[in-house]
């Protein structure tokens, strides 16, 4: 008799989805200028942050907390202007960073990049 418990289909699917998500995050991070990719839940808790990037986990959490608040405010503005509409994406650009935010029902994807990075490295 084997004492190991086989993976339930939901667990196997979660593992596959997790590896697919991680592979997608790695592909995004490889783009020129991308400094970090952050995924949070709706409470701004970090779900994904690549520890191999230059951003520390503390800084990633700071971005997550602040951008979650901003996302909530932006969503309110969109709904105030049109109650049938919802926020799907926004971008912020400063001198040092460009931040792209794609909120969803349960998760938010945030990509932080250097706006002056170019394909030829100049």
Image (tube, rainbow, N blue to C red):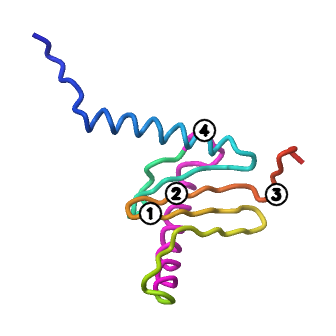
Earlier-in-chain disc, 2 versus 1: 1
Q: Which residues are magenta?
A: 50-79
Q: Report the residue marked by disc 2.
A: 109
Earlier-in-chain disc, 3 versus 1: 1
* Residue 98 vs residue 83, the one in the foreground: 83
Measured in 3D between alpha carbons, the distance from the residue under mark 3 to the one under mark 1, in whole angstroms, is 28 Å
Q: Depth-wise, is mark 4 or mark 3 nearer the camera?
A: 3
Q: Secondary structure at mark 4?
A: loop
Q: Report the residue marked by disc 1.
A: 104
**Quadrant in which the N terminus is drawn:** top left
Q: Position of residue 45 (x, y in %)?
A: 41, 57
* Residue 91 vs residue 48, the one in the foreground: 91
Q: Depth-wise, is mark 4 or mark 1 nearer the camera?
A: 1
Q: Report the residue marked by disc 3.
A: 116
Measured in 3D between alpha carbons, the distance from the residue under mark 4 to the one under mark 3, in whole angstroms, is 21 Å
Image marks 3 and 2: residues in contact by CB distance under 8 Å: no
Of all residues, the one furthest to the front in this rendering is 84
* Residue 50 vs residue 6, the one in the foreground: 6
Earlier-in-chain disc, 4 versus 1: 4
Q: Report the residue marked by disc 4.
A: 52
């Amino acid at each position: 008799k084997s004492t190991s418990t086989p993976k339930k289909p939901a667990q196997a699917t979660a593992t596959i989805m997790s590896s697919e998500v991680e592979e997608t995050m790695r592909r995004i991070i490889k783009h020129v200028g991308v400094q970090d990719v952050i995924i949070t839940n709706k409470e701004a808790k970090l779900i994904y942050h690549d520890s191999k990037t230059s951003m520390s986990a503390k800084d990633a959490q700071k971005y997550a907390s602040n951008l979650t608040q901003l996302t909530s405010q932006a969503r309110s503005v969109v709904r105030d202007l049109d109650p049938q509409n919802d926020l799907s994406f926004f971008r912020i650009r400063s001198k040092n960073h460009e931040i792209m935010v794609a909120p969803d029902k349960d998760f938010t994807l945030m990509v932080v990049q250097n706006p002056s990075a170019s394909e030829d490295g100049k």
